[in-house]
Amino acid sequence: MRIGVLTGGGDCPGLNAAIRAIVRRANADQVDVLGFRNGWLGLAENDFIELNRGSVTGILPRGGTILGTSRYNPTKDPQCLPHLKENWTRHDLAGLIVVGGEGSLSAALELWRDHQLQLVGIPKTIDNDINGTDFTFGFDTAVSIVTDAVDRLHTTAESHHRVMVVEVMGRHTGWIAAYGGIAGGADAILIPEHPFRISRVCALLEERKKGGRAFSIVVVAEDAHPHPDEPFVNEDQSNAIYRHDRLGGIGEVLAREIERCTDIQTRVTKLGYVQRGGSPTAFDRILATRFGIKAYEMIRDGKWGEMAAIRGNKIISVPLAEAVGELKRLDEDIYRVAEVFFG
């Protein structure tokens, strides 16, 4: 028996932990594992490596993915499907584990549903925006990096009596901003789920200054939008910030507007790709490991078209259709916790 695994979409901490778990669990049942390089491209181009206990030794703490990744989507390329099926048959695959985010898992769902390829999924993304699971691996590491950055910025903000704007990732959701902001003690957290009024943000910062707190930390998610009642981002800026293929830049515009409105020195830090690099936290290593083992067991049990997930502290499987139907927005209970500390 032989199975395959690929990692697609953006990299994140914990991918290697998942690969290691799949290989170790499969090998325990005398099942061979092929790793396809660079996401779906590897299966389309027959670019693979044989994975065994030796090849996954020492990769648990490593960030990134030993298989490489890409954002190539085979469902968007009509020339691709025959090659996928040909290589699948060539290797006599009993099943394929797709480790990815919303894009990669959506492709997996379509290939299983419309073309009967025997697929299961593992959710990974720092954004934590996949439905059906409480958490995705990579998220905890990203939050830890944001928390550490906010902790460090507190000291320089206080020393110089400045406002520090910290722009974080998250795509169209505010999970990273909310968790990182709460953990780091931010004074305001701006997220996509709640368009913000710049007047309220500035009033909060001025009130802090009048109360003797001459510095503030504002965490803003990359897709946070000004409230339409109080627009301050012009059309050119909006087109540059809210690009479909690459979000980012709201921090700079926000910092300038805060300084203009409050006359408080304001600086911006954009954490960018540092949030998805480096060694995974213990939580992400364990979650990725549990997901990897579950995914192998789903193949063994023929649970096609499903995804490993965590609910409470239990690892379960859920239909891929449930996972990728729509983005998982920030839990309102979490935002209400954050609001308690605004100001």
Image (tube, rainbow, N blue to C red):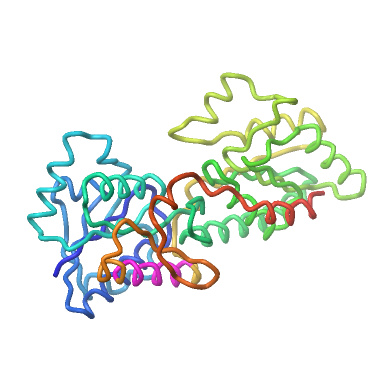
Residue furthest left in the image: 90
Task: Please name whichever residue, 111 or 334, is drawn nearer the observer in this view of the structure.
Answer: 111
Residue drawn at x 28%, y 74% is 57
Residue furthest right in the image: 211
Q: How many marks?
A: 0
Residue 211 position (above or below residue 20): above
Q: Horizontally, is 273 left or right of 237 in the view?
A: left
Residue drawn at x 23%, y 80% is 28
Q: Quadrant of the N terminus?
A: bottom left
Does the stretch in magenta take in 129? no
Give percent across and percent down for residue 284: 47, 66
Residue furthest top in the image: 235
Give percent across and percent down for residue 312: 55, 69
Residue drawn at x 67%, y 46% is 219
Task: Please name whichever residue, 265 or 220, is drawn nearer the observer in this view of the structure.
Answer: 220
Residue drawn at x 68%, y 42% is 190
Give percent across and percent down for residue 281: 49, 67
Residue 310 position (above or below residue 69): below
What stretch of residues is rendered in magenta?
A: 284-296
Give percent across and percent down for residue 283: 50, 70
Main secondary structure found in the magenta portion: helix
Task: Please name whichever residue, 165 or 289, is drawn nearer the observer in this view of the structure.
Answer: 289
